[in-house]
Image: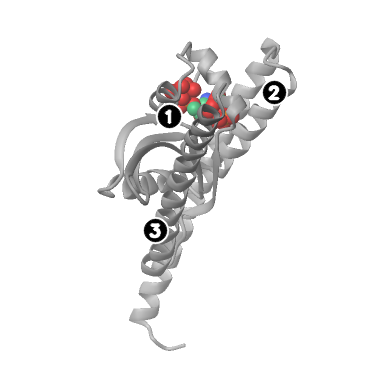
């Protein structure tokens, strides 16, 4: 290959990955703003933590194979929509839908697809809400709309998904039937735990609201 061809390819690849990094910066800023403002207005933070990652070239190659894609930058850009990934861990299930609605309401975010694996968990028990979006990023000479996948889940869903991911890798995808069954059972238990914590939170909130009401009616300390 000619030196100039290689140089062009290098620039193209650098730009390719940078676009995803910039998209993640944009979304992180949006989430920080929502978090800060929500805390101020509602005295409550629905987000436990946020992480981002750009998919590794190796994982991109694996997806090209899996989807039988043409190995070109254009095909990858259009067909692999989770190269930029954001994971938002929320406190409660209802927070997931609140955060999702707040993001979807932003005009520069174009919602391409919503996969609700909470209402419809995957066969193995996986639960999360996935938003596939496009976000514009502005560079010195052009604007580009970049696909990003936002996964929103509770701590319990994240705990399950992280460990399930590890177990699958550890066993090289040859997981025996009883392990698959128990993993699914664990996912159901994680969902039960979520419902229990949400119920306890609601009960406490009612107690707090009643206390606040009686403090107004009876202002004596
Ligand atoms: P990684 O290592 O997290 O990047 P798509 O090709 O994306 O349109 P797909 O793969 O069916 O089709 O999309 P889906 O179901 O939205 O899943 C995308 C991502 O969700 C995965 O990315 C995982 O991060 C997560 N995910 C989906 N299903 C599972 C699951 O059963 N277990 C766990 N632990 N995570 C899951 P990657 O690229 O597979 O992996």
The residue tagged with tag 3: helix, strand or loop?
Answer: helix
Using the numbered discs, state the Cα–Cα distance from disc 3 to disc 1 in whole angstroms.
24 Å
Using the numbered discs, state the Cα–Cα distance from disc 2 to disc 1 in whole angstroms.
22 Å
Q: Earlier in the sequence, mark 2 or mark 1?
A: 1
Residue 122: percent from the left, percent from the top? 49, 22
Using the numbered discs, state the Cα–Cα distance from disc 2 to disc 3 in whole angstroms.
35 Å
> Mark 3 against mark 1, which lies toward the viewer?
1
Q: Earlier in the sequence, mark 2 or mark 3?
A: 3
Q: What colour scheme has been applied to the protein in the rendered image?
A: one colour
Quadrant of the rendered structure where residue 80 is? top left
Q: Earlier in the sequence, mark 3 or mark 1?
A: 3
Q: Is mark 1 within 8 Å of ligand 1?
A: yes
Disc 2 marks which residue? Answer: 169
Disc 3 marks which residue? Answer: 34
| Side of 55 where 36 appears, left or right | left
**Which residue sits furthest left?**
107
């Amino acid at each position: 290959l000619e030196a100039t061809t290689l140089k062009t390819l290098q620039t193209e690849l650098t730009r390719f990955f940078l676009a995803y990094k910039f998209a993640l910066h944009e979304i992180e800023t949006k989430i920080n703003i929502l978090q800060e403002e929500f805390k101020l207005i509602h005295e409550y933070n629905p987000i436990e933590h946020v992480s981002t990652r750009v998919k590794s070239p190796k994982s991109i190659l694996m997806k090209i194979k899996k989807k039988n894609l043409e190995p070109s930058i254009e095909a990858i850009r259009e067909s692999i929509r989770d190269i930029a990934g954001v994971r938002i861990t929320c406190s409660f299930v209802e927070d997931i839908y609140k955060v999702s609605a707040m993001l979807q309401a932003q005009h520069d975010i174009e919602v391409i697809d919503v996969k609700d694996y909470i209402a419809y968990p995957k066969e193995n028990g996986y639960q999360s809400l996935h938003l596939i979006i496009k976000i514009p990023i502005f560079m010195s000479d052009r604007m580009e709309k970049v696909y990003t996948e936002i996964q929103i889940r509770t701590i319990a869903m994240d705990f399950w998904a992280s460990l399930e991911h590890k177990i699958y890798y550890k066993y090289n995808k040859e997981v025996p039937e009883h392990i698959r069954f128990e993993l699914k059972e664990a996912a159901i238990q994680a969902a039960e735990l979520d419902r229990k914590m949400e119920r306890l939170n609601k009960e406490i909130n009612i107690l707090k609201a009643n206390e606040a009401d009686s403090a107004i009616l009876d202002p004596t300390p």
